[in-house]
Amino acid sequence: MMTEDKIDLAKKLAGLMDTKFKFLGIKFGLDPILDAVPGAGTILTTVISFYIVFLAKEIGVSRWDIFKMIKNILIDFLIGLVPVAGAIGSVFYRANKNNLKIMEKYINEDQKNTPKD
């Protein structure tokens, strides 16, 4: 899979998990919906989030940025463990979108540092 394909997949997954739907002006994704399923939902959303980190590692995102991405997932995981309130918290704490921003920042910096022909 090419770098662009990995970034596109990460964008699709982040959008699906964090901002795919809109209700009463609030964007949300599958993350808070799945978090409503005690235990299993939180685990499933965490696995999907870690796949985005895997894609970031594959394209060469720095270890420090990978650490920040894992921290975002851990915060989201802990929020998701709280019944009902965790699902509401997941609407507003968008770990996957935050991690996507880290990936995009890396790509933009990498392109600036790549010599032009």
Image (spheres, rainbow, N blue to C red):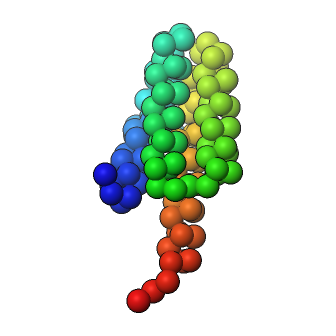
Give the image quarter of residue 29: top left
Give above or below for 17 relative to 114.
above
Q: Which residue extends farthest top? A: 38
Give above or below for 64 relative to 21.
below
Give the image quarter of residue 68: top right
Residue at left offset 52%, top offset 60%:
104
Residue at left offset 49%, top offset 83%:
115
Q: Nearer the viewer, residue 88 or 82?
A: 82
Give above or below for 41 relative to 18.
above
Residue at left offset 53%, top offset 10%:
38
Residue at left offset 41%, top offset 89%:
117
In the rendering, at what x and y percent does residue 85 appear?
A: 64, 19
Indicate left or right for 64 with 112 as reference: right
In the rendering, at what x and y percent does residue 2 appear?
A: 33, 57
Indicate left or right for 28 with 92 as reference: left
Give above or below for 38 relative to 113.
above
So how many labels did they put on this image? 0
Q: Nearer the viewer, residue 54 or 23?
A: 54
Residue 27 seen in render = no
In the rendering, at what x and y percent does residue 47 appear?
A: 48, 27
Indicate left or right for 21 with 26 as reference: left
